[in-house]
Image (cartoon, grey):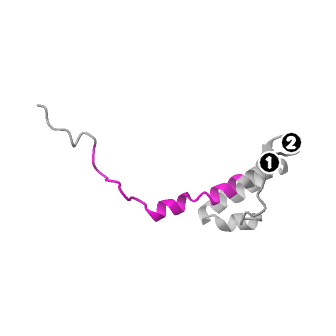
């Protein structure tokens, strides 16, 4: 980790990362998240900018959405309750 001029540590930016510019980060986000990104970018102080950008890069490339779309509900049974399998003791 490196330290920003304010003394706050932030992770180093890997040079081989596919998102290399603010525009790359913005374009990788869904439209509804771009508004949040733009608003946070506008209000972020320069010293905090590397940490903010790193967080958004991580969010945009975490693979969670791809994971959900690849096997969204495989193996899940909806509507079942844990006590449905119990026999009536009455």
Magenta segment includes 79: yes
Please provide percent x and percent y for residue 9.
80, 42
Magenta segment includes 13: no
Q: Identify the image quadrant of the C terminus.
A: top left
**Chain-order first, disc 2 or disc 1:** 2
Contact, CB < 8 Å: mark 2 with mark 1? yes
Residue 27 image-quadrant placement: bottom right
Q: Residue at x 43, y 62 (%)?
A: 71
Q: Residue furthest right?
A: 5
Q: Residues within 10 Å of mark 2 (few under 14, many from 20)?
A: few
Q: As rendered, which of 8 and 16 lies closer to the eye?
A: 16
Marks 2 and 1 sit apart, C-alpha to C-alpha, by 8 Å
* Residue marked by disc 2: 6
Q: Residue at x 71, y 56 (%)?
A: 39
Q: As rendered, which of 8 and 29 lies closer to the eye?
A: 8
Magenta range is 55-81
**Disc marking residue 48:** 1
Q: As rendered, which of 16 and 55 lies closer to the eye?
A: 16
Residue 57 versus residue 51 in the image, above or below: below
Can residue 11 be seen in the rendering of this structure?
yes
């Amino acid at each position: 980790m490196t330290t920003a001029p304010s003394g706050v540590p932030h992770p180093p930016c890997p040079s081989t990362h596919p998102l290399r510019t603010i525009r790359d980060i913005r374009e990788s986000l869904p439209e509804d998240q771009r508004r949040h990104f733009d608003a946070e970018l506008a209000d972020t102080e320069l010293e905090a900018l590397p940490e903010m950008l790193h967080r958004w890069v991580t969010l945009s490339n975490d693979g969670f959405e791809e994971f959900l779309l690849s096997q969204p509900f495989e193996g899940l049974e909806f509507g079942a309750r844990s006590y449905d399998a119990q026999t009536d003791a009455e």
